[in-house]
Image: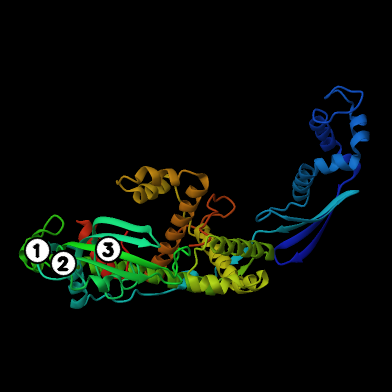
């Protein structure tokens, strides 16, 4: 086997590999053992024809083609060992020839990452102050969540809850049939069709009404779009929403209960303050990471960036196929060529790859690892104790899912460590030798008190800008 090496681009080499007949002999023998049991050769029982007959019958090129994958894989591994190369990802094979067997392999090498003076980064978290208005907002959310619908006399108003029977027909065919359904009419409520709520306004309990609405031309069911729907409705009951008074009695019914409204307000303020501090810490950690990235010198193989770009393009295409984009994004994306999409995504691919490599190097230099117990603990936390915990555990039982969790934990740990360095100028932790560390995976895509009751925790999370779990 003849191997020549040429430098191609930064952290990337090209191997030109040419095999001699003796190099593929063992592969052809294996191919013969596979083919002799599949090919029927005149004059021989299946599996009994000598190799020379099989090779003459099929042709040497056909046998080489049959075993080409194993020939290339084995030869590439041998060439990499011969040249003492450790690929950073799979090499790319092209210029494949059969006579003689030869190919070109572009080999990405381990990137070079110089983190510079990341331990000199200094930042302080933003001050966190909780305004009275924030506490009031949480109280109002709790008040609304504890409100009740109570029956009332009179006529339907927008915002009431109306219990009614509904029968809708289109061209004599029943399109809707509901009995005793609750419905909240609003001026601009498009359900079931625009204008339905308007006809309910002013009706009283026991009252019936017939009316006709035109289905919008852009309705999702094109079979009925633009047609007229005749409704027959009967109001059974009207309810209005009553908010509880914000007093000591109200506070006693929240979660496990608070002795007074003042105590509830103090706990809300504490939770908001903890949430704000955690958010400030996360922002500081992200700023520290960005400064570390800006101060780092990262050189990686172009092939690695190309593959990151390939993944992003495929993700975008998948989202487009599954229609998981917003309508305006879908229209904008659908008309773009592959080259336009790649050009737009290339800067983001470079940023993602650089972030990944900096995080990876930080984990090595700071000796940060993720244990199996860490992964199990993360899964336990996500699974919780509800009815869906078994389904969640099953979803994270695959190797790929557990690797994703491991990478996410490692990324979080690295950013927390970077935040500590930025705030305190902590003494350098003993750096691990990258050659002996098993910590090589970092995510590619990216102490407050425990809540005493879920209801208050959810309300404070919403007020601080976080989405409830």
- Of residues 432 and 46, the one drawn nearer to the viewer in this rendering: 46
Query: SS at mark 1?
Result: helix
Q: Quadrant of the image for the C terminus?
A: bottom left
In the rendered structure, are the residues bearing label 1 and label 3 in contact, judged by CB atoms less than 8 Å apart? Answer: no
Q: CA distance from mark 2 to mark 1?
A: 8 Å
Against 38, is 81 above or below?
Answer: below
Camera-nearest label, 1 or 3: 3
Q: Position of residue 37 (x, y in %)?
A: 80, 28
Picture quarter containing residue 216?
bottom left
For mark 1, does the 10 Å Cα neighbourhood hold few (<14), some (14 to 19), or many (20 or more) residues? some
Q: Is residue 18 left or right of residue 110?
A: right
Q: Residue at x 78, y 59 (%)?
A: 14
View extreme (front): residue: 172
Earlier sequence position, callout 2 versus callout 3: 2
Q: Position of residue 49 (x, y in %)?
A: 88, 25
Q: CA distance from mark 2 to mark 3?
A: 36 Å
Mark sitting on residue 232: 3
Q: Residue at x 6, y 61 (%)?
A: 259
Residue pointed to by mark 2: 143
Q: Is residue 297 visible?
A: no
Q: Is residue 393 left or right of residue 323?
A: left
Q: Position of residue 41 (x, y in %)?
A: 89, 28
Earlier sequence position, callout 1 versus callout 3: 3
Residue pointed to by mark 1: 250
């Amino acid at each position: 086997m003849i191997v020549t090496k040429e430098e191609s681009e930064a952290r990337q080499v090209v191997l030109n590999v040419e095999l001699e007949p003796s190099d593929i002999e063992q592969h052809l023998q294996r191919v013969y053992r596979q083919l002799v049991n599949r090919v029927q050769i005149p004059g021989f029982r299946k599996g009994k024809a000598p190799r020379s007959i099989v090779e003459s019958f099929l042709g040497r090129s056909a046998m080489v083609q049959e075993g080409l994958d194993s020939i290339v894989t084995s030869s590439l591994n041998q060439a990499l060992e011969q040249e003492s190369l450790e690929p950073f990802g799979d090499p790319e094979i092209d210029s494949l020839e059969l006579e003689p067997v030869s190919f070109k392999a572009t080999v990405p090498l381990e990137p070079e990452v110089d983190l510079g003076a990341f331990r000199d980064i200094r930042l302080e978290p933003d001050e966190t102050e909780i305004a009275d208005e924030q506490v009031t907002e949480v109280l109002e959310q709790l008040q609304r969540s504890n409100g009740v619908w109570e029956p009332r006399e009179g006529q339907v108003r927008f915002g009431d809850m109306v219990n009614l029977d509904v029968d809708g027909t289109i061209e004599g065919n029943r399109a809707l049939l509901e009995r005793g359904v609750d419905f909240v009419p609003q001026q601009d409520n498009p359900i079931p069709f625009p204008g339905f709520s308007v006809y309910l306004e002013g009706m009283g309990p026991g009252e019936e009404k017939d009316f006709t609405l035109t289905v919008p031309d852009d309705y999702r069911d094109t079979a009925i779009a633009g047609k007229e729907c005749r409704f027959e409705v009967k109001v059974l009951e009207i309810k209005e929403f009553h908010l509880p008074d914000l007093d000591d009695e109200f506070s006693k019914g929240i979660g496990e209960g608070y002795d007074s409204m003042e105590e509830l307000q103090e706990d809300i303020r504490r939770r908001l303050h903890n949430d704000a501090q955690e958010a400030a810490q996360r922002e500081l950690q992200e700023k520290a990471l960005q400064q570390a990235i800006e101060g780092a010198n990262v050189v990686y193989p172009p092939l690695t960036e190309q593959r990151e770009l390939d993944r992003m393009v495929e993700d975008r295409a998948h989202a487009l196929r599954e229609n998981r984009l917003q309508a305006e994004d879908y229209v904008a994306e659908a008309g773009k060529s592959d080259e336009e999409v790649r050009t737009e995504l290339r800067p983001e691919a470079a940023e993602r790859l650089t972030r990944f490599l900096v995080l990876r190097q930080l984990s090595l230099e700071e000796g940060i690892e993720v244990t199996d117990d860490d992964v199990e603990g993360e899964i336990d936390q996500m699974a919780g104790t509800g009815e869906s915990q078994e389904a969640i555990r099953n979803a994270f039982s695959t190797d790929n899912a557990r690797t994703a969790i491991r990478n996410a934990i490692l990324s979080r740990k690295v950013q927390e460590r970077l935040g500590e360095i930025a705030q305190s100028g902590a003494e350098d932790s003993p750096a691990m030798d990258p050659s002996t560390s098993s910590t090589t995976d970092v995510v590619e895509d990216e102490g407050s008190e425990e809540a005493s009751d879920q209801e208050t925790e959810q309300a404070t999370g919403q007020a601080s800008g976080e989405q409830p779990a």
